[in-house]
Image (cartoon, rainbow, N blue to C red):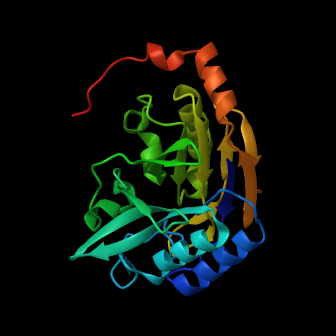
Amino acid sequence: MKVTILQRNIEWANPAVNVQRADEAINRNPGSDLYVLPEMFSTGFCTHPEGIAESTESDSLEWMKRKAAETGAAIAGSIAVTKDGKYYNRFYFVKPDGSVAQYDKKHLFTYGGEHLRFTPGEERVVVEWKGVRILLEICYDLRFPVWARNRGDYDMILYVASWPTPRVAAWSALLVARAIENQCYVAGVNRVGTDPTCEYCGGSVIIDPYGKTIAACATGEECEASAEVDMEKLEAFREKFPVLNDADEFERK
């Protein structure tokens, strides 16, 4: 399965422009099976979502559906959405047949005040695409390994993020850790540019189960990068070195 990560410079609170630029980036990189956009790719990361968050039937989501159908690929990324007076940081995974899986961010970013207005999710979401089981995660979730612990139910993690430049070393280190400890592929897609409060330098990568970077975007630039997720190699590695079988049992409460 070919995966393309799309490191974007997001224009603040302007879905039409951001969707158009994402569309153009996908067109420049045909032939992928999965395209992954950053966290809140249509607006930028907003902790005050009033007037910025989109409806659950937004033009941005409709574009994802159209683009998936047009390309025959899955399109993934998170959008700030509002429904019934509540706000969610919602990760959409859209397939070409129009089906949509969604994950609401579990770990809201208290340091930035995200928890004051957004409602957290409670369910882990794993989707299957092209024979690969994929766990959906958003930004701050990366700091909480219990939530992402591989229970034998996935082969790859997608992390979409708006992770600021001052903490990008943690982003890079934790992505590698998640790949190694969960014996899986990891794709981390961060943004670049600025918003009203932060600067972002990217650091978007695809990492293999050994912790090796197999695709990377240029620092500080809009960029696309692609890599193959090879299930035969992953299964052979897991059979040869069955570390997941030795993991501690636990129950999350």
Instruction: Specify whether residue 8 is in view.
Output: no
Q: Residue at x 42, y 32 (%)?
A: 149
On screen, residue 215 versus residue 95, left or right, reads right
Q: How many marks?
A: 0
On screen, residue 71 versus residue 128, left or right, reads right
Q: Residue furthest front?
A: 97
On screen, residue 152 versus residue 18, left or right, reads left
Q: Residue at x 63, y 14 (%)?
A: 240
Is residue 221 placed above or below 238 in the rendered structure? below
Residue 119: x and y in percent read 26, 62
Residue 45: x and y in percent read 47, 68
Classify residue 221 by image quadrant: bottom right
Q: Quadrant of the C terminus?
A: top left
* In the foreground, 42 or 116: 42
Is residue 220 placed above or below 49 in the rendered structure? above
Instruction: Specify whether residue 122 is in view.
Output: yes
Residue 93: x and y in percent read 48, 60
Residue 137: x and y in percent read 45, 50
